[in-house]
Image (tube, rainbow, N blue to C red):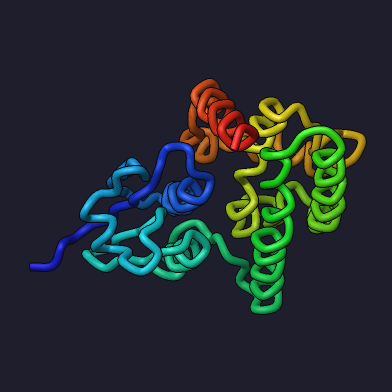
Amino acid sequence: MAEKGVKVFGMWASPMAVRVEWALRLKGVEYEYIDEDLANKSEALLRYNPVTKKIPVLVHDGKPIAESTVIVEYIDETWKDGYPIMPADPYERAQARFWARFAEEKCNAALYPIFATTGEAQRKVVQEAQQLLKTLQTELEGKKFFGGDAVGYLDIVVGWYAHWLPVIEEVSGASVVTEEELPLMKAWFDRFLAVDVIKATLPDRDRMLALNKARREQLLSA
């Protein structure tokens, strides 16, 4: 008999894994969460995702799906009668995917170096990241969320910025999302983190600070 139910293989501090939990909770789908030790990955994780061997992985009735954005779309398509994550209009859906890819390929790539740099090099990458985030911020003009009046697909994809970026800023000493430079995004941070489903799955900030301080020290000393 095929395995029934929903499982999520993640890691407590992963901003990509939390996207899957947000989507499932918005839909009201019950699931089992398995927290992975990425230095000692479980046999189950490697069996379900033998290609990239990464988290997150969603397992639905024994069938695995990998890659967080793919998983979020799968959740929306599978539990159609629940909370709508993707826009109903095809053009708006395409736009949401476009901006999600922009965030994944451009914004994320610009944010990661902030964590591993200092001094003038860091100031340069902060400015580059801010310019890209300002472009993304235009999608918030006249809206409460990227999804409009409620959290949608793009909010889920970029939602990690709201909780993880302030930690990166504190650890690295950089200021990225400020009221002066990115006022719409700064206000969106507060609105997004106030949503019950979102804040229910956020990792502990003190624990994240400790983890990221150790990582930064390791990177800078390498």
In this rendering, the count of numbered labels is 0
Identify the residue at image location x=78%, y=32%. 174
Image vertical order of residue 98 relative to residue 22, above or below: below
Which image quadrant for residue 171?
Answer: top right
Q: Quadrant of the C terminus?
A: top right
Do we see residue 209 in this rendering? yes
Identify the residue at image location x=60%, y=29%. 217
Judged left or right of residue 148, residue 175 is right
- Near-viewer residue (117 or 184): 117
Which image quadrant for residue 82?
Answer: bottom left
Q: Position of residue 169 (x, y in %)?
A: 72, 31
Q: Quadrant of the N terminus?
A: bottom left
- Near-viewer residue (216 or 111): 216
Identify the residue at image location x=56%, y=33%. 218
Q: Position of residue 184 (x, y in %)?
A: 83, 43
> Which residue reaches farthest top?
206
Q: Position of residue 41 (x, y in %)?
A: 29, 48
> Which residue reaches farthest bottom?
90
> Which residue reaches farthest front?
222
Image vertical order of residue 206 relative to residue 32, above or below: above
Image vertical order of residue 56 relative to residue 214, above or below: below
Judged left or right of residue 32, residue 192 is right
Do we see residue 194 in this rendering? no
Q: Position of residue 212 (x, y in %)?
A: 56, 31
Identify the residue at image location x=46%, y=63%. 67
> Which residue reaches farthest left?
1
